[in-house]
Image (cartoon, helix red, strand yellow):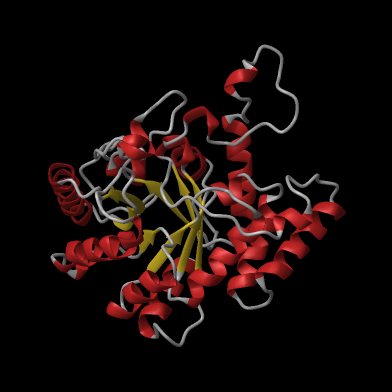
């Protein structure tokens, strides 16, 4: 079956301004950052024996069950997974065969996403690190032959975080250089995630958008088409920086990351505004995973980017579904129609 991602990428490149295509990814790779907390909180009572002071979370099987449901729904274009969950769901269960959804894996896990209980890594300059290997992402094993079709995934997320520290940023770029060479040799595609600085960068935070844009363009200027990312994943730093980046290179496909959960209107307004100002991809992780009804939430995201419904109308329609299915909302509708400030770093 043709993958919707491939079709949409081709259409966007052929007509960057005129086409209305929009790519939605469900980022289910949180286990590489949050550990046990990745599946989200257990909303029911904690099982006996849990240390309630540490929180009470769903299990890995709960997480995989939700991923299976998202794949079966078939609305998103990409499902991003850890290598271990990719092995289970793609290689062993073969859930992406016959599906329009493209599987992808997190190809590196830099230190600024190590969000573990008691940890302080998010307050230190990011350091590059890779748990997964491209061989295991593609085939689940080490191999010398990369000409065969991937049984896992041939697409991965590679993440960088610039902190305005010469030594740290130099190391990040050197590791990205090495990754690109390996990826090209092994027939592996990637999209590039660029976070805002996770530590004080030494300048006014209002300059963050320009700092990030310049780093992206400067980095990509030295990369020819064979080694370039298929699209970007960046924080939404407002309409100005997004429009600036989108206008600079119309062949550069820009995606925005969802960030912290926030209200339902936060999530719906973000995807609406991102498309309005030049983004063609949205990658939502916690916003989907921590919602009361992930499948209905995803349906509303699709209806918004296709112009069928406004963000506020989508919030009301979403609450109607919750009421109809007897699901208690996290917030009453009145509160869920408020916009709040979202954090723009992974942590």
At a point 63% along the width and 71% down the height, the residue shown is: 304
Give the quadrant of the C terminus.
top left
Whether residue 22 is visible = no
Tell me residue 335's x, y (percent): 73, 54
Tell me residue 340's x, y (percent): 59, 55
Tell me residue 118's x, y (percent): 44, 23
Along the line of sight, which residue is nearer the eye, 172 or 9?
172
At a point 67% along the width and 59% down the height, the residue shown is: 338
In the displayed image of the protein, which residue is found farthest to the top? 49
Task: Give the side of residue 55 with respect to residue 207, left or right.
Answer: right
Q: Quadrant of residue 142?
A: top left
- Above or below residue 285? Residue 9 is below
Task: Give the side of residue 217 with respect to residue 320, left or right.
Answer: left
- Above or below residue 15? Residue 331 is above
Whether residue 239 is visible = yes
- Above or below residue 134? Residue 6 is below
**Number of numbered discs present?**
0
């Amino acid at each position: 079956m043709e993958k919707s991602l491939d079709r949409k990428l081709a259409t966007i490149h052929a007509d960057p301004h005129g086409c209305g295509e929009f790519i939605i990814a469900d980022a289910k790779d949180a286990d590489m950052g949050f550990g046990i907390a990745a599946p989200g909180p257990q909303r029911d009572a904690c099982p006996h024996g849990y240390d309630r002071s540490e929180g009470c979370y769903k299990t890995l099987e709960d997480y995989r069950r939700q991923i299976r449901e998202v794949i079966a729904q078939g609305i998103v274009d990409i499902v991003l997974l850890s290598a271990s969950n990719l092995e289970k769901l793609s290689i062993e269960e073969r859930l992406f065969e016959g599906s329009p959804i493209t599987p992808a894996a997190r190809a590196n896990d830099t230190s600024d996403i190590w969000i573990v209980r008691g940890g302080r890594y998010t307050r230190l300059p990011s350091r590059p690190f890779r748990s997964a290997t491209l061989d295991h992402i593609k085939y689940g094993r080490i191999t010398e032959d990369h000409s065969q079709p991937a049984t896992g995934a041939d697409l991965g997320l590679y993440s960088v975080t610039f902190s305005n520290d010469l030594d740290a940023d130099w190391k990040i770029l050197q590791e990205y250089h090495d990754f690109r060479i390996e990826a090209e040799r092994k027939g592996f595609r990637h999209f590039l995630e660029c976070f805002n600085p996770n530590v004080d960068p030494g300048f006014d935070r209002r300059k963050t958008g320009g700092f990030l844009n310049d780093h992206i363009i400067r980095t990509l200027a030295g990369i020819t088409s064979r080694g370039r990312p298929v699209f970007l994943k960046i924080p939404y730093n407002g309409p100005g920086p997004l429009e600036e980046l989108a206008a600079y290179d119309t062949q550069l496909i820009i995606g925005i990351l969802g960030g912290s959960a926030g209200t339902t209107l936060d999530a719906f307004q973000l995807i609406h505004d991102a498309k309005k100002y030049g983004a063609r991809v949205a990658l939502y992780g916690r916003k989907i995973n921590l919602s009361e009804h992930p499948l209905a939430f995803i349906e509303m995201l699709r209806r918004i980017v296709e112009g069928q419904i406004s963000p506020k109308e989508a919030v009301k329609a979403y609450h109607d579904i919750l009421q109809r299915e007897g699901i208690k909302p996290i917030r009453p509708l009145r509160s869920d129609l408020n916009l709040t400030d979202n954090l723009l770093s992974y942590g």
